[in-house]
Amino acid sequence: MLCKPPLKCLKIVIMANLLTMFFVMEMIIVSGLSFGASGLNMNYYLLSCPFVEPVVKNTVNRALQDDPTLAAGLVRMHFHDCFIEGCDGSVLIDSTKDNTAEKDSPANLSLRGYEVIDDIKEELENQCPGVVSCADIVAMAARDAVFFAGGPVYDIPKGRKDGTRSKIEDTINLPAPFFNASELIKMFGQRGFSARDMVALSGAHTLGVARCSSFKHRLTQVDPTLDSEFAKTLSKTCSAGDTAEQPFDSTRNDFDNEYFNDLVSNNGVLTSDQTLYNSPQTRNIVNAYAMNQALFFLDFQQAMVKMSMLDVKEGFKGEVRKNCHKIN
Ligand code: HEM
C-alpha cells in the first residue's frame, strides 16, 4: 500500500472497512424495505448468490435462441406450478414407485422446457450450492421467456421455497379447456384473481400451441362461437391425429395481442379462449386488449407478479431442493 506513515495507513484501512460495512448494511436495509406482505424479497439472493439473475437470463436466452417455441413451455410451466400447491416447484418432481407426481397428469403431459430449468439449476448449484430454489428458477425463467418473446419486462420478488408434495390428484384444480367464462372466473376467483386478471393471464395463449385433443369436442357439434372457416382449419389440424398442434394465433412465438384480435373474430382455439369474448362478463376486457396492446402488457405483468406469489412457502415451510426432480 502506498501510504506513509503506518498510522495514516491504518486510518485508511479502518475507513475503508467502515465504508464497506456501511454499504452492506444499507443493502440489507434496502432489501428489508422491499419485503412485501408475503416476506418475499426483490434482493433475496443479493449476498448469497449475486449472479442468479444473469445466470437465469442467459440460460433462457440461449435455449430460446435454439428453440423459440420453448418460451410458451416455460410460461405454462410456471402457471401449472403456481396453481397446484402454490409456486413451489412441485410440477418438477418426478414420480416414484410410491407416488405419481403432478407432471404425469394428463393436464401436464405436454409441458415443455424442463431441460432449461435443469440447466439453470446446474449452473446455480455450481456457483452457490443449496441456495436458489427450483420454484424461484421456474418463476424467473417464465419472466425472462415473456421478455424474450417480445412481451413486457417485469421483476418478481424471490425467496420461494420448494415444496415436498406433488400428487397427480391435485391437478384436478387446473382449469379445463372446455370451461366457460363463469367457471373460469370462479376458479381464478378462488385464488384471489379478478376476472380482469384471469383474462390478462389467458393472454399467455399469445404463445404456443394446443393439441387437437384439447379442442376436438368443438368440431362435433354446431358451435356458433366458432368461425366457420376457422372450424375447417381446426378440422384439418385434427385430421393428423390427437397430438397434432394448432397455434393459438398466427404469431405463436411472439408475445403480442394477436390472441385477443383472434377472439374478436371468433378464431379462438379453445372453448375457454373463445368464451372470454362471448361472455358479457369479460367481453369488454377482450375488446380493450385487442385495441390496446400496451394495456394488455400492463395488466399481464401485474397479474403475473401476483400469480408468482400464489401460496408461496417461505422459511421452514419448504426447502431448497438440490435436484429439482426430487425432494431432498
Ligand atoms: C384460463 C384458463 C386456462 C386454460 C383452460 C388453459 C388450457 C390450456 C390448454 C388446454 C393448452 C394446450 C395444451 C395441449 O393441448 O397440449 C394450453 C396451452 C398453453 N397455456 Fe394455457 N390455459 C389457461 C390459462 C393459462 C395461463 C394463465 C397461462 C400462463 C400465464 C397459460 C399458458 C399457456 C401456454 C403458454 C400454452 C402453450 C404451451 C406450449 O405451446 O407448449 N395458460 N393451455
Image (cartoon, rainbow, N blue to C red):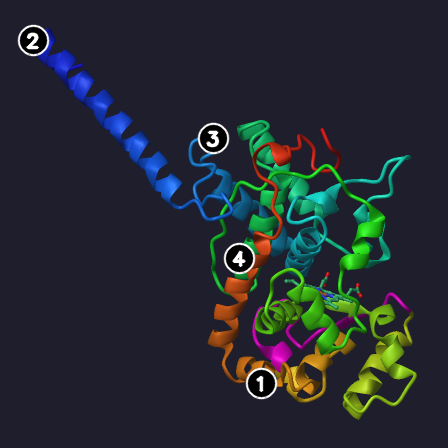
Q: Quadrant of ligand 1?
A: bottom right
| First reached walking from the N terminus: tag 2 or tag 4 | 2
Mark 1 in CB contact with mark 2 (< 8 angstroms) = no
- Camera-nearest label, 2 or 4: 4
Identify the residue shown where x is 86% and y is 57%: 106
Task: Give the image quarter of residue 307.
Answer: bottom right
Disc nearer the start of the sequence (3/2):
2
| Disc 3 residue: CB within 8 Å of ligand 1 | no
Do residues under tags 4 and 3 come within 8 Å of each other at their CB atoms? no
Query: Label 4: which residue?
Result: 305
Magenta region includes residue 254: yes
Give me the residue at 62% from left, 47% from top.
138
Identified at 51% across, 77% down, the residue is 293
Q: Amino acid at mark 4?
A: Val
Image quadrant holding the N terminus, namely top left
- Measure the alpha-carbon separation of dots 3 and 2: 38 Å
- For residue 270, say whether it is visible: no
Mark 3 highlights which residue?
48
Q: Using the image, tell me which numbered label, if any, was put on residue 5.
A: 2
**Magenta residue span:** 242-260
Helix, strand or loop for disc 1: helix
Q: Is residue 10 above or below residue 131?
A: above
Q: How many marks?
A: 4
| Mark 2 CB within 8 Å of ligand 1 | no
> If you read the primary sequence from the N terminus, does the residue marked by circle 4 or circle 3 appear first?
3
Q: Indicate which label's residue lies in the foreground, 1 or 2.
A: 1
